[in-house]
Amino acid sequence: LFSSLRSHLIVPSLPSITIPSSLPSSSTSSPIFKSAIVLHSTNNTRTILGDEKDIITSIGGTGSSLSHQEETRRSACPSIIFSTFRRCFPRRNSTASARKTRGVPLSSPSSSRIHFGCTRFFTLMGSGVSSSSSPEPDEMLSLSDRLAVLLGHKPLRLADMLKVTRLISEASVEERIALVHSHIVQTILELIGENSNADHKPDSGGRRNRQTRRNSAHATHRGVGYGHGSTRSRWDIERTVEERLAREEHLIWLLNALVAFIVGRDDMESGVILGGIDHIEPLEKEIGQSALIPLMEYHLKNDSVFDVSEHMELYQALLETAAALSLVPSLVPLLVIPYTTGAKSISKHLIPKFKDVMSSYPNLLKGQMGSPDFRMIDFIRKIERYSEIVTSICDEYERANPVEETAPSTRPSTSAKRVSTELALLKNLPDSIDSPAQLAIFYQKALKHLQMQTYRFIGDYGKLAVPFTFKKEARNLNPFSPSMKDRTKRIAKELASMPNALPLNASNGIFVCVDEGRCDIIKVLISGPDDTPYQNGLFEFDVFFPNNYPLSAPKCSFLTTGAGNVRFNPNLYNDGKICLSILGTWEGRPEEKWNPYCSLLQVLISIQGLIFVKEPYFNEPGFEKYQGTEKGEEYSRKYNLQIMHATLTYAIRDQLRNGPDCFKKVIQRHFWLKRHAIIEQAKKWLVEMKRDALDAEKSNKRKDSVSFDTIYTPFAQERTIQSLIQELQNMQCPVDQCE
């Protein structure tokens, strides 16, 4: 190779670059360094450093004595890859690496300045100098140098990372130890941190608070028809998704390379690394201080089957990495002991829960998806296998080294035991619950298992047995058609994620009921949040997925309208229409509209959080000009007074008397647990209503109704609320119905 370089090289004059004085002597003595540097002496003599005994000197030099053909052939040689020179320098830190990438000269106050130029490297295909037996340039490099070049490319490339994983897995123990000393593995850990920062690194409190204050005036009105602002996009959704996918790909490649370093050619299921762990021991501290464990904790908290199914390769790589770490005894504590205060144990809490959530998916809607989702099933099997490796080894470690429990381990109870506990809870419930925290505990235990349930909406001959807004669309669509296969799988994944994602507490909650035979026919019950005019009410919705879902948003209809007599919100019409940008019924910014990455869960939470608000009066376009004024506050108070009455009448009394059968148990338990709060709420409304009526009489002015579709009749409304109070006071515990 050097003789070829010597006989075919014409040395150009190149700009000078500073070489750090801290450059190790081992680097300057390497053949690559010597064959790549040209020193310029004061007499314009250019010397190519070769072997110590072989120095070639070219005097002066334009090469004019050469023949025109020879000069043309030599000048056509491709230039040497500049990374060849970079391999001679150890990687110091990310700042220096970034400066090298940008082409900024590396320098320090104590550096010695040596002027040099890069030679031109050539490859003459088919010439007599090069032969088929000549080695490739990379093959002359050490393993560390080859990996450093491959990992130094920005951005990372799939072909390079596949080569990195192969080279590491085929390396001997001695070569892996050399990779540690040359900081190759440390570089992989650094790259994992760089590609995961955007996902799990928390923002500073000051910046978050400033952003919250900046957007506080607009956050509650986005996507609900607020009467000002621009509809232009403030961020590029497609670009954001592409960047996230690129980061995930890089993470997967880097995690695979790390697993290859730890395990090598060994099979993890054997439970032992046959090649030994001498190459891993020097990295114990670096792995513990890297972003690897926080990355695992961040992602394994995800209990959404739908979201995990969209990123299966990443989660498989994370579980495989955890299994590889568990094979090293000195790294097992990283999986057992939480890495910081407030974190959870990966082996005791996160991995078992993650495995249970994934394992429940195949049986959740069995029989509705047609053919099984084989890719998802294969993923679940791998997750179960890796989880078994981690939990078995970590359990053995805990038996030998007892670890203080940071949180009690929860075991799933049987259905019979759970129901028995809930019935006993309701029977022994005190007459009055003063503590909100105590009420929240009772509410969770009594209603958690009813938050996601099934009901027979379709009767004989395929006809709907219950009222459903979208019955025509449901009748015209065959969910078992082969063309609907992907749609059905998508819906099934979303529904499998809901039991762990739907909000449920005493202040607000969402309940979902799915048809037993078709997962695209759904009814939803949303409880009104506290401190709003919708407090304690239960509002019913119909949901249907169109045939091109998820390209189009699900269809939703509002049912709690008092037979079309009341409009609960400027965004909830008395004919059932819901005005919301994510549903495509209101013009909003592109990022507020529906896209295939959205889900039904987002729609339901948007309805609860953006429509059932504290001051719904200002959701009406054009009314925002009164916000913050005395007139606007008075209008909002009067509007809320009418909405509070509608909530007590239609969302509480009517639901208690004639609520949908599919939510019968939910309605009974909800109102039983919150009956005292509702009575206080009704009494408060009576006081405010009487005071408002008295003020109207004193002013000798006609009572203005600021509600949209309700009629202000205070005496009739008072009788309705009084009867509701009496009904709640006489309410019986729903245990008998449950039994």
Image: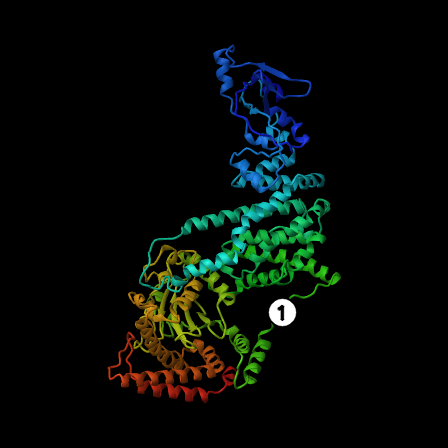
- Residue at 52% x, 25% y: name it: 15
- 299 lies left or right of 390: left
The N terminus, quarter of image: top right
Look at the numbered disc 1 and give the secondary structure of its residue. loop
Query: 650 or 233: which is nearer to us?
Result: 233
| Up-down relation of residue 502 to residue 490 (above or below) | below
Q: Position of residue 228 (x, y in %)?
A: 32, 60
Disc 1 marks which residue?
411
Residue 683 can be seen, yes or no: yes
Query: 594 or 622: which is nearer to us?
Result: 622
| Up-down relation of residue 489 to residue 79 (above or below) | below
The residue at the far right in this view is 400
- Identify the image quadrant of residue 335: bottom right
Query: 190 or 156: which is nearer to us?
Result: 190
Q: Position of residue 113 (x, y in %)?
A: 60, 28
| Up-down relation of residue 442 to residue 153 (above or below) | below
Residue 594 can be seen, yes or no: no
- Residue at 59% x, 39% y: name it: 163
Please name the amino acid that badge 1 sits on. Arg
> Mark 1 Cα within 10 Å, few/some/many (few <14, many 20+)?
few
- Identify the image quadrant of residue 388: bottom right
| Up-down relation of residue 243 to residue 151 (above or below) | below
Q: How many marks?
A: 1
- 491 lies left or right of 100: left
Q: Position of residue 722 (x, y in %)?
A: 38, 88
- 639 lies left or right of 258: left
- Identify the image quadrant of residue 357: bottom right
